[in-house]
Amino acid sequence: MYQNSNYVIHICFIVMLISFSNTSYSQTPPPSDQTGSMEGVMEEENVVTYTASFFNRFQPNSALDMLEQLPGFLMSISGELRGYGSDTGNVLVNGRRPSSKRVTVPSLLDRIPANQVEKIELIRGPVRNIEMQGEPEVANVVLKTDVPAAVRWAFSGYKNFDMEPVPIFTNISIADNWNGIDYNAGLDVFRVAESDRNREEIRDINNALTEKRLEDGNEREFEANFDLTASKWVDETLYTWASQFGIQEGGEDFLSLRTPQIPGSRTRSEVLFTDTGEIQFEAGLIAERNLSEFLKGTFLVFATRENEDETATERSFDPDENLTEEKMRVSNQIEKEGILRTEFEYSAIDSHNLRFTLEAAYNEVANKVDQTTDTGAGAVTVFVPGENTTIKETRGDFLIKDIWALGDYELDYGLGFEVSKLTTLGDQDTEQNLNFLKPHAELSYTPDESMRARIRVAREVAQLRFTDYISFSLFSDDDVALGNPNLRPETTWKTEVGYERRFGQENVFKITLFHHWIDDVQDLIPLATAEAPGNIGDARRWGLRFEGTAELDWMGLHNGRLDINLKWQDSTVVDPVTGLNRVLNATIITASSQSIFDTDNEYVAVIDFRQDFEEIRVAWGWDMTLEADLPVFKVDELDLRDKDPLINLFIETTRWFGIKTRIDVHNVTNMTERRTRSRFTGQRDISLLDFRQLQHRKDGIEVGLTISGSF
C-alpha cells in the first residue's frame, strides 16, 4: 500500500536541499537594474513584510495573485465548519478576518485589484491586535487608503475532450465608497460540468471474472451567488455588514452497462438520474470599538440558512430493455445556523496581552426522505432507519488566554471550555450533553527574523458531522449508510515542534514534527447486520510537514521558483472488526473546500514550479500532486483508492491592455484513478470474500482559458 512513500519523500528532500545549499552559499546579488522584484522585503519582530514592489515580477492582477506567490505560505480553506472562531482560516485583510463564511478567501482576494495592495505581512507570532487562532502563521493583506472605485471581472472556460458540456465561471465585483460606507458587491455565476468514465470488473473469491461494467456519468451544476459587504465608522465604532444570497441547480446522469461473463449472457443496464436544487442565505453584522486605551471589544451576530431538495431515480433494465426495477428517493434538507460572539483584548499589563472570547451558536439540520421501490407490482415504501431525522445543537465556547513576551521568547497559553447539547429527533429521540476543557500552550523562540523555533501543545475537539447522524441510501454502491445519534466527537492532544529558516527574500525552509494522541476515534462500528459511524477507542498519529520555497537562478533558470509542500504520517488504531492494529481511515475528498493535506493517508506531496519573464510579461509553470493510497476500512468491506501523479501546466501573460490571459492544461497525462472494493460475506477479513470490484477511471485532459482584469 505504501511502497512509493520513501521514493517520493527522498526526491522532495533532495531537490529542496540542493536548492537551499546553492542559494544560501553561492547566490550572487542580482544586477542593479533587476532588483525591483527583490526589494520591498522588510523584517520586524514576528513579521516579515512584503511590499507591493516585491510582487512586480509576477505581474499580479489581483491580491490573490500576490498571496499565491508569498514565499513559504500555504493558504488554508475555511467556511465548512460550524461556528465562527473555529473556521476563520489563516488570511486577514487589513488585520481582520473575513466577515463572511460563504464568500471564500480566494474569491474575496480575487476581487481586490493588485494596485490597491500596499503590502502583505507574514505574521509568525502575536503582534498588535492580531489573533493567531492556533495557526503557526497568518498572512495580512494591507490595502491602500483613499483608493478610487474599482471593478474587477473574470471569465473562465474549460474544455474536456471526454465530455460535451463546457464548464464556465464568470464574476464581476465593484468596490467603492458611498456616503462614508466602504462596500464591495459581487456576482458569481458558475456552470460546472464533470464526467465519470469508469471500467469495472467484478471478480469472485477465486479472482475469476464474473461481470464487466462500463459506466458513463455526467454531473452538471448551475450556481449563482450575489454578496454584499459594507463597513462604516459611526463615531468610534466600526460596523461591518456581510450578506450573500445564492441558488444552485444541478444533477447527475449515470449509466452502468453490466455484462455477466457467462456464455450466452447479454448486457443489462442501470440508469441513475439525480436532480438537486438549493437556496442559501447568509447575513452577519460585526461591531468593533476601543472601549478604553487598553481595552478593545468586538461583537458579532451571524445567521445562515440552506434549503436543498433532491430527487434520485435508479432504473434497472434487462437485456431486452424491459424495466425490472425502479427506485426513487425524494429528500429535503434544511440547515440553519445562528452565532453570537464577543471578543475582548486587554493590553495594560506590560509584556502581556490578555484575550477573552465567548461564542454561542445554534445549529439545526432537518432531513426528510420519501423512498420507494417498484419491481413491477407497484411502488412499495422503503424504510431506512434514521433517514427522517432532525438534529439540533446548542453550543457555547469560552476562551481566556495570555500572550507573554519574554525577549526572544514568547509564550502563548490559555484555557478554553466547550459545552454543547445535541438533540436528535426522529425514529430514535436522543439527547447528549457534552463538555470539554481545551488547554493550549505555545512557546516560540525567534532570535532574529531568519530563524524561528516553536513547540506547541494543545487539546482540540473535533466537530461532529451532522451527516454521521443521518442515514441515507447509496444507490451507486447498492448500500445503505446508517447514522448514529450517539456519536461523540473525538478529542486530540496535539504536540508540534517546528523549525523555520529563511535565506534571503524568497528561500524558506520549514519543518514541523507532530504527534497526536486521539481519544474516542470516529470510525465505523459493526452492528448486528450493518455498520454505522461510532467511536472505536484510542489512536495515535505521528509524522512531519515540510514546506519550502527556493529560487532557481543558480540552475540558470532566472526568476524560476520551486515550492514544495509535503506531509508524511503514520498512525495506529485497534480495528473494531479484527482486533488488530491498523492505520486510520482516510478521508475521501469530495469538496473543493477540503484540503488533501488533512486526510489520513501516508503521504501527500505538491510540487509547484514557476518562471517569470519580466521583459515580455509572460510566465509559465507546472505543478504535480502525488498521493498515497486512500484506505477506508468498513465493517464488511475494504475500499482502497489510488491514483497516478496529477500534472498541470499553465502559461499566462499581461501584455495586452493589462488584462491577464491564462491558459491551463489540467491532467496532462490523463491519469488513471483506481478503486478496489473488496466485499466480504460477513465481517471484513474474518469472513470469506464475496466479490472484488475493480474500477479504473480517467477524467480526461482539460484545457482552460481565463481572462481577468479591472477598471
Image: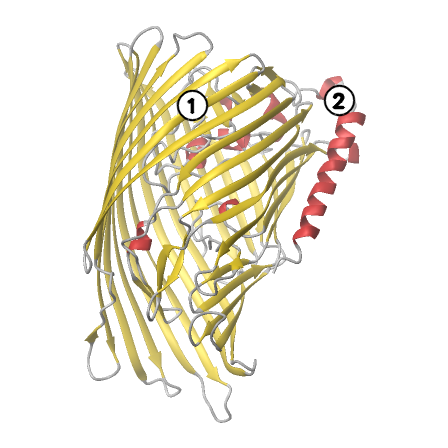
What residue is shown at x 28% (from left), y 73% (from top)?
A: 327
Where is residue 326 shown, x and y percent of the image?
28, 76
| Amino acid found under the numbered disc labelled 2 | Pro
Would you say residue 700 is visible in this rendering? no
Pair 1/2: label in front: 1
- Find numbered disc 1 in the image and state the secondary structure of the residue it sits on: loop
Up the image or down, 649 lies above or below 68; here it is below
Q: Return the disc, 1 or 2, that comes first in the chain's sequence.
A: 2
Residue at screen point 41% across, 72% down:
255
| Observer-nearest of 666 and 532 | 532
Disc 1 and disc 2 in contact, CB within 8 angstroms: no
Q: Which residue is mark 1?
A: 131
Q: Where does residue 74 sit, x and y in percent of width and height?
A: 54, 35
Question: Is label 2 in a helix, a strand or a loop?
Answer: loop
* Label 1 to label 2: alpha-carbon separation: 37 Å
Mark 1 is on which residue type?
Glu
Frontmost residue, 67 versus 519: 519
| Residue with the mark numbered 2 | 30
The residue nearer to you, when weighing 699 against 592, is 592
Furthest residue to the right? Answer: 26
Q: Quadrant of the C terminus?
A: top left
